[in-house]
Image: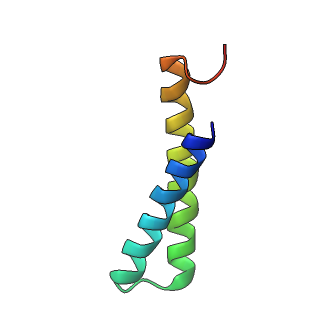
Amino acid sequence: MIIAVLTALVAALAGSLVTVVEGGRPTTAFKAGAFAFAGSLTLLIVVMGALGVVGS
């Protein structure tokens, strides 16, 4: 579970950084990072659950 959270956080930070580099505003970057974090975390939990890593 911790691995999923850390991976999602890295994806969110990367998404925010790309938004800022492309000339986006910090608010837009924050929103992009939040959406990336939520999406990545959900996807990782589903995948890890399917693989039997999370849950029983």
44, above or below 31, in the image: above
Could you say which is closer to the camera, residue 15 or residue 27? 15
In the rendered image, the quadrant that contains the C terminus is: top right
Residue furthest toward the right?
56
Looking at the rendering, which quadrant does residue 18 occupy? Answer: bottom left
Q: Position of residue 43 (x, y in %)?
A: 50, 37
| In-front residue for pair 25/16 | 16
Q: How is the image coloured?
A: rainbow
Depicted 43 relative to depicted 17: above or below: above
Q: As drawn, is 30 to the left or to the right of 47? A: right
* Residue at x 53%, y 83% (from the top left corner): 26
Q: Residue furthest left?
A: 22
Q: Looking at this rendering, what residue extends furthest in the front direction? A: 3
Which residue sits at x=50%, y=61%?
12
| Image x and y of residue 7, in percent | 50, 49
Q: How many marks?
A: 0
Q: Which residue is pictured at 55% across the width and 41% down the height?
A: 4
Q: Position of residue 13 (x, y in %)?
A: 49, 66
Residue at 48%, 28% in the rendered image:
47
Percent x, y for residue 1? 63, 36
Frontmost residue, 53 versus 50: 53
